[in-house]
Amino acid sequence: MSDTRSVSDNVSNPVIPGFHPDPSICRVGDDYYVVCSSFEYFPGVPVFHSRDLVHWTQIGNALDRPSQLRLDTPSSGGIYAPTLRHHDGRFWLIVTNVAPGEGNLLFTATDPAGPWSEPIRLPGVPGIDPDLTWDEDGTCWCTVAGVSQVRLDPYTGETSGEPRKLWSGTGGMAPEAPHLYRIGDYWYLLIAEGGTERGHGVSIARGRTPSGPFEPCPANPILTHRSTDHPVQNTGHADLVEAPDGSWRMVLLGVRPRGGTPGWHVLGRETFLAPVEWVDGWPVVGALTTDMPAPAWPLHPHSGSPVRDDFDQAELRPCWVSLRDRPARLCTTKERSGWLTLHAAGDSLDEPDAVLVARRQQHLSCGVRTLIDPAEGRGGLAVRLDERHHYEIEAAAGEVKVFARIGPLRTEVASRPVPAGPVVLGAEIAPHPPEDSRTGPDLVSFGVEEPDGTFTALGTLDGRYLSTEVAGGFTGRVIGMYASAGTVHFDWFDYEPRSVR
Ligand code: 6LW
């Protein structure tokens, strides 16, 4: 067996940090692929590849054109909970778009990096969190949250009969995220229950056919961190995969709350990996390893992006996302060679159509810099949780300002004159030491880089207001560049993980 096939349990979790929830995994030969939810961001459904389940590289976004992805939706609407499977020589991706008029959609590809097909619409499949599986006869079964199931022709999207209730879990709220697998002599129905907050957990049942009847595992929930002081909370929404050596793993979502009570998580729901053993025909989930050494990779391991993006490629790297759409007339690297050019559509980041190009914040501590030329407009560097919760530093000719938008309030926090011309804007994000129980999760500082390279902070803000516990919803922070008036150009963008003690 080659080195690349050995699967390490010495995991530094989360294996895909930052807002990457609802992971679904599949393996083809030696290659593993994971997809995640993406909500209001475009392109949607990030696709990751790994050979060892630990180091993941983003190889694309499955939904990268408006004909596949219509996001007429506020934050935390849009794309929920994909399932990725490989069957009959191709990859199948089924997902819910909760935007009006969309619903459940099915896509196929021969290469998971893309291109993915146009959507097959599934009007006969109700609800969220669709799963796909095929039985021995080749019949395709689609199972959704609730948990119910309908027979599906995946080539046409037609369903036969009404959805049938299968199992509603062990009594926790929101039985959801079903995945159905044939393993040995049984069909296993894995679900999440308890809600995607602190009560989250994973339960399983098994039956002799894909439609049941299902017998619950006596040890349910097979995974939960509810009512514990584990540093990873909200663990649930899992998917199982078998390694080439016959061992099993689970990918799942979890969050890392920080600060005083009740704890705030700012990176969204992240993807974790856990070992799984089979005992008496039931899966037993091992502990999540959470030691997180300081990042040592020169290349950013999870986005395939170097610390610096110079915008010297015709297409943006797959880690860059925008709000709802990204028309080339508003966002392009082709207008000024080696620069990213953004043309404002609205007049602030509050606008639903703000022109933003951002990446997930993937580390509890990080530093960001970008060189902006605001000569023809106004724009800056934003840390965003949703349209009502974001902080930014904005440059216009001769001046920079720091703003905070928290719910209905927007305030100018600081301002400073700067020489006309390009300016380096920066943000530093640092978590509070865990032992200080009075604080929020972290501090977010904005400032400018002086010509000698030193960073001058202009405003420092409590990070709790850009957390899910304050803002609500299903996403996490993104950090990026935006235009709020006219045209602004960005020469480069640096994202550098910092060590956390
Ligand atoms: C998703 C549901 C969930 O549809 O959150 O954690 C919802 N689980 O299964 C949105 O991600």
Image (cartoon, rainbow, N blue to C red):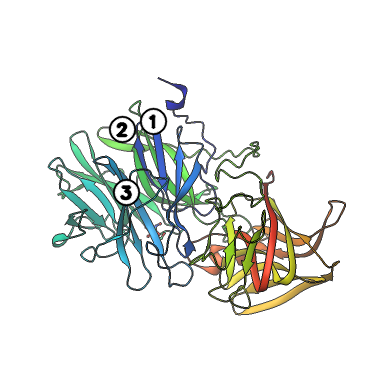
In the depicted structure, whether residue 332 falls above or below residue 352: above
Q: Position of residue 210 (x, y in %)?
A: 17, 47
In the image, which disc is placed on residue 203? 3
Label 3, residues with CA under 10 Å away: few <14, some 14-19, many ≥20? many
Q: Which residue is mark 2?
A: 278
Residue at the spot x=37%, y=61% of the render? 68
Question: Depth-wise, is mark 2 or mark 1 nearer the camera?
Answer: 1
**Foreground residue among 376 and 121:** 376
Tell me: 80 left or right of 216: right
Q: Quadrant of residue 446?
A: bottom right
Determine the quadrant in which ligand 1 lies.
bottom left
Q: Is residue 225 visible?
A: no
Going from the N terminus, do you reach mark 2 or mark 1 first?
A: 1
Q: Quadrant of residue 175?
A: bottom left
- Viewport quadrant of the C terminus: top right
Residue at the spot x=58%, y=72% of the render? 354
- Viewport quadrant of the N terminus: top left
Q: Which residue is mark 1?
A: 30
Q: Position of residue 369 (x, y in %)?
A: 72, 55
Residue type of the residue flagged with mark 1? Asp
Q: Are marks 3 and 2 in contact (CB under 8 Å)?
A: no
Label 1, residues with CA under 10 Å away: few <14, some 14-19, many ≥20? some
Residue at the spot x=68%, y=45% of the render? 500
Q: Position of residue 331 (x, y in %)?
A: 58, 64
Going from the N terminus, do you reach mark 3 or mark 2 first?
A: 3
In the image, which disc is placed on residue 53? none
